[in-house]
Image: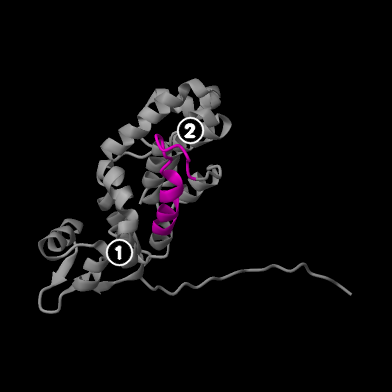
Amino acid sequence: MVSASAWATPSTRTELIENLVSGVDRYNPSNVGILEDYLYHQIRSEEYDCLANLAILKLYQFNPDLYNPDVVINILIKALTSLPFPDFNLCISLLDERSASTNPDEPDPLPLLLPVLISLHNLLQQCRFPAFWTLYRSEKAESLRDNYTVECVGFEDSVREVVIRGVKAAFKSIRMERLGNYLNLSDEDLNGYVAKLGWSIEASTGVVSIPPNPDNQIESTVVQEQIELPLTFA
C-alpha cells in the first residue's frame, strides 16, 4: 500500500517535474508537452504520479485548445488502479462536458470510453472483481483494450494488486477457485501468483491461507476515559 507522502511526492518524480507540479509554472501552458511526455513515461515504466497528471487536466481546463483525448484516457487508466486513493474521481472532476466529435477525420474517443472507464472504476471500488473482468473483456471495452491498456505496461497486474488489497482486508482464508475468479487467473498462472505472494495453499482442500494483518484480525479494544469534574460546594 502506497503511503500518503509517497502518493504526493513519488520517489520517481524528477526535479524538473517537481518544479512544474509545485512551482509557479504549474499553469504555464507551454509546459504541457513536458507533462504529457512524463505521462507516457509512466505508461511505459509502471510508474505513477497523480499530481503531475492532474496538472495536465487543469491545463486542459484553462486551455481547451491543448486538449488531447488520448492523454485524458491514459490518465484515467493510470488512476483506475490507484484505489483506495480517490485519484480517479479527482481526475473526473477536472473534465469538461464533451459530446462526441462530429469530425470523421478526428473523432474524439473519450465520450464513448468514459462510461466504460467509470463503470470499471465503480466495480473495482465496490470489490465486484469478477464483474470487472467480465466488463473489461467484453465488446464494450474492446477499443479500450486494443488501443490503450495494451500500451500500459503492467495494467492487469496493477488491477490484481487492487484485488489483493481487498482480499487481504476481508479474508483469513479463501478458496482457490474464488480467488482465481477475483484475479482472472487459473491453473498454473494462479498457482504462480499465489506463490509469488508467499501465501500457503492447502492441497487437499484448495484453500489459501492469508497472513494476518490489521484488517483481517478481529481484536477487542477497551477504551478507558477519565473525566474529572470540578468540585462544587453549596
Of mark 2 and mark 1, the one earlier in the sequence is 2
The residue at the far bottom in this view is 205
Secondary structure at badge 1 equals helix
* 44 is higher (above) or lower (below) than 77: above
Residue indicated by mark 2: 67
Q: Residue at x 49, y 36 (%)?
A: 57
Amino acid at the residue labelled 2: Tyr
Q: Which mark is residue 134?
A: 1
Location of residue 40 in the rendering, given as x and y in whole percent from the top left corner: 33, 33
The residue at the far top in this view is 30
Name the foreground residue: 112 vs 35.
112
Give the extent of the magenta segment.
100-120
* 5 is higher (above) or lower (below) than 124: above
Location of residue 26 in the rendering, given as x and y in whole percent from the top left corner: 52, 27
* 118 is higher (above) or lower (below) than 4: below
186 sits left or right of 152 in the view = left
Q: Quadrant of the C terminus?
A: bottom right
Q: Residues within 10 Å of mark 2 (few under 14, many from 20)?
A: some
Q: Residue at x 42, y 50 (%)?
A: 112
Location of residue 10 in the rendering, given as x and y in whole percent from the top left corner: 38, 37
Q: What colouring does the structure picture have?
A: one colour
Location of residue 94 in the rendering, given as x and y in whole percent from the top left corner: 54, 42
196 sits left or right of 48 in the view = left
Residue 24 appears in the picture as rendered: yes
Name the foreground residue: 133 vs 162.
133
Name the foreground residue: 216 vs 143.
143
Amino acid at the residue labelled 1: Thr
Q: Residue at x 37, y 27 (%)?
A: 14
